[in-house]
Image (cartoon, rainbow, N blue to C red):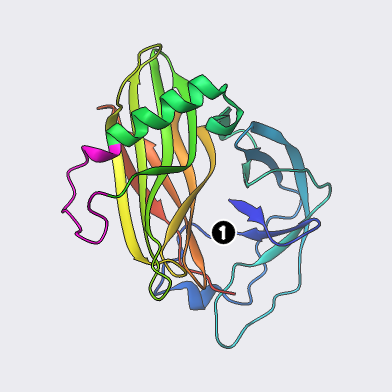
Amino acid sequence: MIVPAGSGDSVAVVIPEATDSTIASFQGINPPISNVTFDLFGRGGKIGSSIAASALPPVVERDCYTWPRARLQATRANWEVGFASGHVQAIKLDSIEAMSSADSAALAAALAQTAATLPIKVDPTFRGLPFRVRSAYTFRLDSVQVVVADIVRSVNEEANPRLEHLLIVGQRPAGSSGKFEVGYFSRTAGAEESTQATELLAAVMIGETKRPAIVVSIEYDDGGKLGLIERMDSGQWQATWKSAYTDC
């Protein structure tokens, strides 16, 4: 897997088997990806393909960890994640921001209703506060509409602003309205400037079985991880992989 690394044609090469306890051993290596073709994906689907020209000289940081770097032969705009060609197919996402005002309002209402029914312990800090849809993307799998949404509640106290993030993966019959059946959710809450947030990078179908998966970036105040949330045969969604933590 590769992800953009700053501007230009530089990319970070994610080592899937690295963990928080072993990532130190991957510092300073040259990933063997020269002449490998990568398909590049974003929230709009497949953006294009590019060949990895070469690994960049390894740089070892003393106080933090990073992924090895490489360079692509050709850059593409608006891509978020890349996989070796031929292993992954794209799923195009529709953003709530691009919907008509009526459709976006209906989706926001359905998501608020869904969030209100989650089986989470009541936090008195956020009790009674309205839910706000920070981001929401939908796509269709056969006869099912899937939504991936980040829903927030906030306490706007000047001295101690607090924020709650609810990541929800829900589904309902295509063409229906009302709340979603939740297939996966996670909750984080804390100080506004340091609360963990999860960003959706792309939705794809992996391998010969074309298993639907969501690629996410899990962002902390000083670093982050990448992750996969996959749809199981049961129809539920499950977090199946998280990368090592990097903070350079």
Outermost residue toward the right in this view: 74
- Based on the displayed image, in which of its 4 quarters is residue 185 positioned? top left
Task: Return the residue at label 1.
Answer: 14
**Up-down: is 237 above or below 26?**
above
Seen from the viewer's position, the closer of residues 150 and 222 is 150
Outermost residue toward the bottom in this view: 62
As for residue 227 lying within the magenta part, the answer is no
Q: Using residue 52 as the reference point, say whether residue 145 is left or right of it.
A: left
Seen from the viewer's position, the closer of residues 22 and 65 is 65
Image quadrant holding the C terminus, namely bottom right
Please name the predominant secondary structure of the magenta segment in the image: loop
Question: Which region of the structure is painted magenta?
Answer: 115-128
Q: Which residue is drawn at the image coordinates 27% and 56% (left, top)?
A: 126
Q: Position of residue 137 (x, y in %)?
A: 50, 33
- Under mark 1, the amino acid is Val
Q: Position of residue 135 (x, y in %)?
A: 49, 41
**Up-down: is 79 above or below 57?**
above
Task: Give the crowd class for mark 1: few <14, some 14-19, many >=20 residues within 10 Å.
Answer: some
Q: Which residue is drawn at the image coordinates 34% and 26% (left, top)?
A: 171
**Up-down: is 98 above or below 230?**
above
Q: Position of residue 56 (x, y in %)?
A: 76, 68
